[in-house]
Image (spheres, coloured by chain):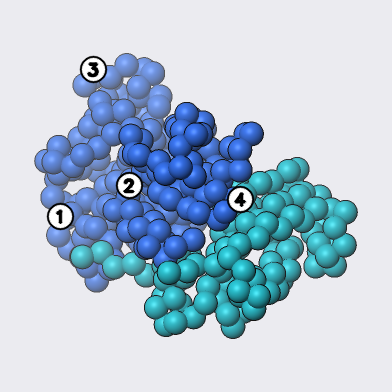
Amino acid sequence: MKKQLKRTILEQANVWIESNQKVVLARVIHTWGSSPCPTGSSMIINEKGDFFGSVSGGCVESNVIAECLELIKNNNLFKQIKFNVSDENAWDVGLACGGEIKIFIEQINS
Amino acid sequence: MKIQILKEIIQKKSSKEKFAVLTNLINGNSEIFEFGKFLSKDFESSKKEIENYHYLKKNGVIDGTQIFIQNYIKPIEVIIVGAVHISQYLVDLFKNLDFEVKIIDPRKYFITTERFPNIEIINGWPEKILKKLQTNSNNALITLTHDPKIDDPALRYALKNKFFYIGALGSKKTHIKRCERLKEAGFSEEEIDSIHGPIGIKLGGKSAPEIALSIVAQLVSETHKL
C-alpha cells in the first residue's frame, strides 16, 4: 500500500478536529492584479493560532490568522476579508506585491 | 463548512475523483458538486453557470452570484520507465507537485522498495505492463534507461495512446538513433518530434538531482500549456 508522507491541508484540519480543536478554513476566493496565490489557495488555523498552508506569499497571513482567531472567539461561522494595496493593515504586514485579494474564512463545524 | 463535507473532500481527493466544492458566500453553506448531481436550493438556480465553471476548471466567485466554486481535477499520472538514481529524485519532486507516479523496470535489482519506498513500483517489461494500465491523455511518460529494448516499447505505446508529455533521456546522438528506429516503426515526423529528447530543460547540471529538476521543470511547463 502506498503511504502518504505529507498531510494535505485538509487532512491536517481533520487531525486537529479529531483532537477536539476548533479549526477555521481560509480560502482565496478572488484576486486582482499581481496577488501571489491563485484563487482556491487555502490555509487552516486552529484555536491555538497554529496554521498550515497559505493565502499569500506571507504578506497577509498574520492578519488572516488574527481574523480567524477572532471568528472562533466570537463564535461566528464565516466572514469575508479583503486586502488591497491601499489597506493600511495589509501595508503594515507587507502586502507589497500590488495585488488585492478577497478571502473567505469559515469555521469547520459538526 | 461541515466536517462531513471536509471528510468527503479528503476521501474524493485520495480516490482521485473529479469534483468541485460549492460555497454559498451569503449563508456559508457548502456542498460537493459533480456532473449530473442534484443541487440543493442554495445552488440550484445557478446550475448552468456552475457546470460551465466546472467544465472550464475555473475557480472563483461565479459572475453575478455569491457562489464560490473550487474545482478538484484528476492529478497527472507520470509513468517512469527505469528505476534509476534520477527516478529517486523525481519521486520526491513530483510528490510535492501533486503528480501521481508509477515506476516500471524489468530489472529486479533496480526496482526495490528499499530504493523506492512509498511509491508504486512495477517489476516487468513496459510493453506488457502498459497494456494492463488504464492510460489516457492525462498521462506523461519519462523513459530513463536509454536501453532501446526497455525504452522503445514504452515510447511507442505512449505515442499511440496520445500521452500529453513524452520525454526520453539520452544524448543527442542516442536520440537521433531513437528517432530513426521510431520512423522505421512507422511513426510520423510530427509524432516523433513531440518526444522531448534529450529530456529536460537546459539547466546545465549533470548530477542526478539536477537532471530530475530539469525534467520536472519541463513537465510542469507543459502542463501549463494544456
Dot 4 or dot 3, earlier in sequence: 4
List x then y, in percent, for residue B168. 36, 39
Callout 3: chain:
B
Single out the mark in the foreground, 4 or 3.
4
Q: CA distance from mark 1 to mark 3?
A: 28 Å
Marker count (numbered): 4
Residue behind mark 1: B123
Callout 2: chain:
B
* Chain letter matching colour blue: B
Q: Which residue is pictured at 58% across the width and 65% down the height?
A: A77
Query: Compared with residue A87, is residue B148 higher up or lower down, i.e. above or below?
Result: above
Callout 4: chain:
B
Q: Are marks 4 and 1 on the same chain?
A: yes
- The residue carrying pointer 2 sits among few (fewer than 14), some (14 to 19) or many (20 or more) residues within 10 Å by Cα, namely some
Callout 1: chain:
B
Callout 1 touching callout 3 (CB < 8 Å): no
Q: Secondary structure at mark 1?
A: strand
* Chain letter matching colour cyan: A
Q: Secondary structure at mark 2?
A: loop
Q: CA distance from mark 2 to mark 4?
A: 28 Å
Question: Where residue B26 is drawn, which disc sits there?
Answer: 4
Q: Is residue B39 something that shows in the picture?
A: yes
- Give left or right: position of B135 versus B74: left
- The residue carrying pointer 3 sits among few (fewer than 14), some (14 to 19) or many (20 or more) residues within 10 Å by Cα, namely few
Dot 2 or dot 3, earlier in sequence: 2
Dot 2 or dot 1, earlier in sequence: 2
Residue type highlighted by circle 1: Asn
Callout 2 touching callout 3 (CB < 8 Å): no
